[in-house]
Image (tube, helix red, strand yellow):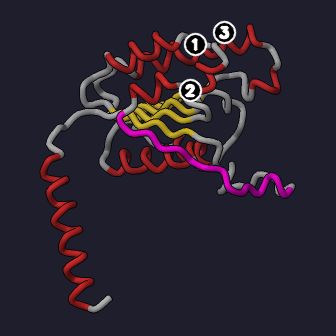
Amino acid sequence: MSSDQYKQRMQRKKDHIDSRIEEANIDKGIIVLLTGNGKGKSSSALGMICRALGYDMKVGIAKFLKGEQDTGEDTFLAKQPNVQTVFMKTGFTWDTQDKEYDTVMALETWSEAAQYLTDESIDLVVLDELTYMISYKYLDEQQIFDALNNRPKNQHVVITGRAASEGLMEVADTVSEVKDIKHAFRANIKAQKGIDL
């Protein structure tokens, strides 16, 4: 490809992108769904948390499933004045092996998360591993949809977790699937601080 051909190609691309940017004129809170079997869904949500904090926005985080796991991000976020977090107190459900108890804990956590979704002062709500709460039937999916649909107009929501339901995909504005190609854990490498924890 010659220099002139490259320049013409990039100009066409720029024109297309500029026109799409101009057409995007709706300003509202969006729902981002991060699903799939690959590593990085919660990490991506953390990136959006950092972006929000960079703009001095307020963030509410509800962590389902990982409540008893100490992570670097939890240590960091606990020091941030614009962040409030609720943790499901069970940790991983395969550790408790008690559906009734896990359901009670999920409902307790959801009760607090649902308050975030009514609070106009919270700009971003992260519902980490919420997909499991639906697929395990710990929470009522319609109740979640109602809370999402009735939240403040400009509030953003990020939902993470594997095997997202069709309903969640429908209600989300952006859906990304993280694909699992290779994972260190399958090579017997334990979770690493700063990367996995």
Residue matched to label 1: 139
Which percent across, then down, holds residue 107?
59, 11
The tag earlier along the polypeptide, 1 or 2, is 2
| Residue in the foreground of this view, choosing between 124 and 130 | 130
178 within the magenta span: yes
- Can you name the residue that lies furthest to the right here? 188
Above or below residue 25? Residue 95 is above
Say which residue appears at 56% left-offset and 43% top-offset.
42
Tell me the residue that label 2 is attached to: 130
Residue drawn at x 39%, y 31% is: 172
Give the label, 2 or 3, closer to the camera.
Answer: 2
Residue for badge 3: 104
* Relative to 141, residue 21 above or below: below
Q: Earlier in the sequence, mark 3 or mark 1?
A: 3
User: In this picture, is 60 found above or below 79?
Assistant: above
42 drawn magenta:
no
Q: Are marks 1 and 2 in contact (CB under 8 Å)?
A: yes
Q: Secondary structure at mark 1?
A: loop
Q: CA distance from mark 2 to mark 3?
A: 15 Å
Magenta range: 173-187
